[in-house]
Every structure is written in structure tokens, then in C-alpha cells.
Image: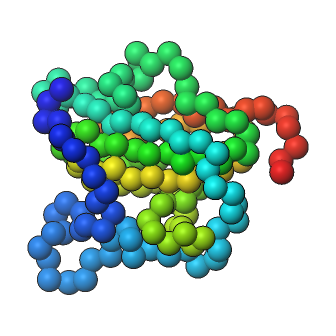
Amino acid sequence: MQSISPTPENRLAERPLGLENVTHRVLVYTDLVALNPNRDTRPPARTLQIHLTGNMERFMWGFDGRRFSEIVEPIRFERNERVRVTLVNDTMMAHPIHLHGHFFELVNGHAGHQPLKHTVNVAPGGRLSFDLTADAPGDWAFHCHMLMHMHAGMFNVVTVRPLDAPSS
Ligand SMILES: [Cu+2]
């Protein structure tokens, strides 16, 4: 592991890299409030933690210490289950993590009006959570949107099953 962050922490209220010292106003994630109430009011039935990992020297990136070519299992969700997913960025780079097929709610302190996102930028040494209702059956890409990171391994498949259940 290269340049590992010792204690990832919630950095949603901090300005992103490069905008720390500008004089104009900078919106941060804790400023975002959904205009409409969140549709799924169920508390998460389970939690899932995923580490964003890398080796800057070898330019390898991945989830939980493995790049995609080494990952044997997709990330599985039961259809319509409600899960709180925590992303822990163990690296010293930002990773904009993107989930296809769904909008998730960023847990940013505005319960009931959590902002809907499909991509969230995880600050270096940052950790954050989103609440996901896995309401889109199928197989979906889940990856860093820095395409060089994706190609270097920070990618996995999200599988939502069953395919044929009636949606609730
Ligand atoms: Cu990345």
C-alpha cells in the first residue's frame, strides 16, 4: 500500500481539492438538500462497507484491495432491499464513485431529504455513506469515474436479484 490514509473520516463538509482557498463561495456536499422528500423511508436493513484502495507506485486501483481482474464475486443486492453503503477511501486521491442503474441518497445530515446522486466524489482519506434502494434488477457497473482508475482495476459489478419479482 502506498500513501495510505491512516484514519479516513467524514469530509462531506469540506471543500474539495483545489478549492480549499478560493475566495468565492464553494458548495460542499452537506449543502445539498433534496427538493422532494425521499421516496423510500425504510431504515437500511443492512450495511455494507467498501474500501477504495490503491498503490500509486504501481498504478493499481481497486475495491477492498483487489482490482477487477482479481475479483471473483460481484456486489450482491436483494431486489428492493434498502442498504447503507459506506465507502472508505484509504488512498490519498479523490475517487468519484459511480453506480449505474440507480440513484442513491447521500447520507449528509438531511434525513428525509438526502440528495439523490449516481456519482459521489470520495475525498482523499474520506469516508461517506449512501442509502440505496436496490430497485433496478440486473447487472450494473460500479466504478471510479476517473477512467484511468477504472481501467487500472477500480471496477466491480453490482448484481440486483431476482430479475422477475414484482417491484414493491
Ligand atoms: Cu479513482
Q: Is residue 71 left or right of residue 157?
A: left
Is 161 or 43 nearer to us in this picture? 43
Q: How is the image coloured?
A: rainbow
The answer to which quarter of the image holds residue 53 is: top left
User: Which of the pair 57/75 is nearer the observer?
Assistant: 75
Instruction: Left or right? Give the position of 13 relative to 24.
Output: right
Residue 89 in the image: x percent, y percent?
A: 30, 43
Residue at (24% x, 68% y) in the render? 15
The answer to whether residue 19 of the structure is visible from this angle is yes
Q: Position of residue 127 (x, y in %)?
A: 33, 50
Q: Residue at x 28, y 60 (%)?
A: 11
Write the residue at 73% across / 45% down.
Answer: 80
Specify the farthest residue to the right. Answer: 166
Q: Quadrant of the N terminus?
A: top left
Question: What residue is shown at x 22% (from left), y 44% (from top)?
Answer: 7
126, 24: nearer the viewer: 126
Quarter assignment of residue 164 = top right
Q: Is residue 76 above or below residue 106?
A: above
Q: Which residue is the extreme one toward the bottom?
A: 24
Q: Is residue 90 toward the left or the right of residue 136 in the image?
A: left
